Image: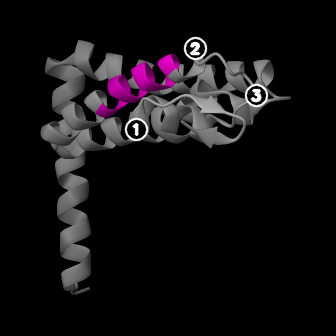
Amino acid sequence: MRKTSKNVLIDYMAKVIKENEKFLREKKKDAFSIVVEMVNDAIDYTMFVVKRWKDHPINCTIFFFILHILMPSSYAILADLLIGNLPACFMELRLMLESLAKCYVADLYPEKNLFFEEKLLCIRTGTKRRRNKHI
C-alpha cells in the first residue's frame, strides 16, 4: 500500500510524539510527571469549582479561568511537550499565571453581583462601576 502525502506527515508526527514520550519517560520523568499532574489537577479543580459555584458561576472569574484557560492550556502544554514545542509550553504557562492573577484580583472587586466579564473589564481599565456606568 502506497502512502499518500497526508499519511507521511501524520506518520512522521506520530513517530516524533512516540520518541519524545519515550525520552521524557526515561530521562525527564519528573518534568513529564509534573505536566501530567497539572492536567489531572485541572480536572480536579474543575470539579471542585463546579460543585462550589454551581448556583452563581457567572459572577466568579476563577470559574472562567478554570474552564477557559486552565483546562485547555494544561492539555495544550502536554501536547506541545510531546511534539517538542517548548516555546509554546512556556507561553501557555505564562498565560495561565497572568490570567490566574488577573482573575484573582477581579474576584476581589467589591461589587459582587457583577458579571465576571465586567469585573475583568474594570480591572483592565482601572475604572469603578457605579449604577451600570463606568466612571
Q: Is residue 114 left or right of residue 2?
A: right
Protein image colouring:
one colour
User: Relative to 60, is 64 above or below?
Assistant: below
Main secondary structure found in the magenta portion: helix
Residue, x 51% and y 33% (percent of image)? 122
Mark 3 = which residue? 113
Going from the N terminus, do you reach mark 2 or mark 3 first? 2
Disc 1 element: helix
Type of amino acid at the residue the image marks with label 2: Leu
Disc 2 element: loop
Mark 1 = which residue? 73
In the image, farthest residue toward the front: 135
Residue, x 63% and y 35% (percent of image)? 116
Distance between the Cα atoms at labels 3 and 1?
28 Å
Going from the N terminus, do you reach mark 2 or mark 1 first? 1
Image coordinates for residue 54, horizontal then vertical, percent: 81, 28
Distance between the Cα atoms at labels 2 and 1?
24 Å
Residue, x 53% and y 41% (percent of image)? 68
Mark 2 = which residue? 108
Residue numbers of the magenta segment? 95-105
Image coordinates for residue 74, horizontal then vertical, percent: 41, 33
Q: Quadrant of the N terminus?
A: bottom left
Q: Is residue 39 left or right of residue 130?
A: left
Image coordinates for residue 104, horizontal then vertical, percent: 50, 18
Type of amino acid at the residue the image marks with label 3: Asn
